[in-house]
Image: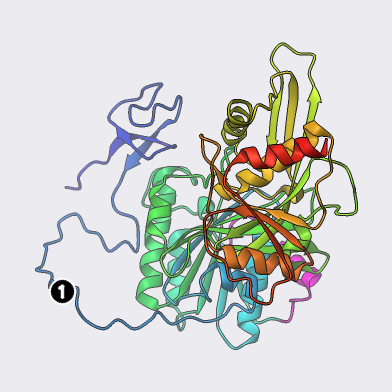
Amino acid sequence: MAKASRSLYVCQACGATAARWAGKCSACNEWNTLVEETDAGPPPGSGITRQSKGRVVKLESLQGSVAEAPRFSTGIDELDRVMGGGIVPGSAILIGGEPGIGKSTLLLQVAAHLAQRGKRSVYFSGEEAVAQVRLRAARLGLAEAPVGLASETNLSNILTTLSDDRPPDLVIIDSVQTLWADTLDAAPGTVSQVRAAAQALIRYAKMAGAALLLVGHVTKDGQIAGPKVIEHMVDTVLYFEGDRGLSYRILRAVKNRFGPSDEIGVFEMVAGGLREVANPSELFLGDRTSQSPGAAVFAGIEGTRPLLVEIQALVAPSGLGTPRRAVVGWDSNRLNMLLAVLDARCGVSFSGHDVYLNVAGGLKITEPAADLAAAAALLSSISGITLPREAVYFGEVSLSGAVRGAAMTTSRLKEAAKLGFMQAVLPEAGEADTNGLKLTLSRIAHLKSLAAAAAACD
């Protein structure tokens, strides 16, 4: 007699299970996230049985030669850069982003480029009909590419279709939240269904040597929806960022088992699809013809790529009891810390002013070396003195006001010199190879030096 299935309550935020319903998840403390699901058995293609007998696993040593993972190019240089040089056969890649950001467009371009070079690409769309995907392909000029296309959400049908012919080189699932396994009594998009679908597809990709690209929905916080275990199961996690009101898009790697996990790729959305941006520094420099105070150019690093971006500050007298602090593209806590350091260590008070800080182009900066550029923009705005247009700034500011060194100084300076900048304000500590660079270096050890220079010009 078959064992009766039992009901569990699964948290849709963290994946924790409970025997009974509660308004609050005891694992992640989120409210109204427990959904009843039936545990009817393992998903198809998982290779898990209820009464499987274990076997002895051979233990290996750490010594031995390991060949570098083979890769094949996607035909899109920016995407290859983010993934460490190309796609590794048998790897699982999860890409997330807001609706309409361009995920499906990018993956359709990848599938078409590979198919045109003789590789087998299969595209399963769970959100759009075949006719809709064909319309997009025609608009992008890719209708002639021999891509295998199907509109399917049943996990068993997808696995059977993939096993019916020779293993494909690339499998695209758009998206994993639409798939459902008929052995699970749960709605598509729930934790159990998403986890089961990802597990079965990743198992197939590893066994067949096919690269797997999964599209994931994002929550209102910008995180990929579903349990975090999905991100642990895949080899690479990519986020597609950007404002739909702007033409640029940023592809950022946050996890990569076969390459660096902090690279970015920059694209521009045009009528013919996503176009690669060869020099993203020019995209984020903003309007460099203006002579208004409060703008400083930050020489940053994203992964291994140097990137110049303009940081804009506006300091205005406030009529409020608590002045406003608004930040776009930077950490608001970092701004509050920097304002406190300028007040306590440099004698420049912002207590009676509203402060607005913006990163040009909407790029999100997380590097601490942006402190010095942000401080220069703030001092320029409050003093009304325009900073030199040909100068770049970088360096981390500590709570004592000391300016600390930054990594990859030489790469930052080379990028600045290539774009025509003549001066660099950087920390006193740190070596830099400036041979052949027409740059004047201004090294400072404390933030007081920058504040004193702004006061002297006032």
Describe residue 36's horizontal placement relative to residue 294 as left or right: left
Image point (52%, 69%), residue name: 83
Residue 36 makes an appearance in the image: yes
Describe residue 264's horizontal placement relative to residue 282 as left or right: left
Residue 151 makes an appearance in the image: no
| Of the pair 180 and 440, the residue shown nearer to us | 440
| Image quadrant where residue 436 sits | bottom right
- Where's residue 244, x and y in %? 75, 49
| Image quadrant where residue 317 sits | top right
Q: Which residues are magenta?
A: 123-144
- Where's residue 134, x and y in %? 73, 69
| Of the pair 199 and 331, the residue shown nearer to us | 331
Residue 136 is a magenta residue: yes
Q: Residues within 10 Å of mark 1 (few under 14, many from 20)?
A: few
Image point (62%, 47%), residue name: 370
Return the residue at label 1: 60
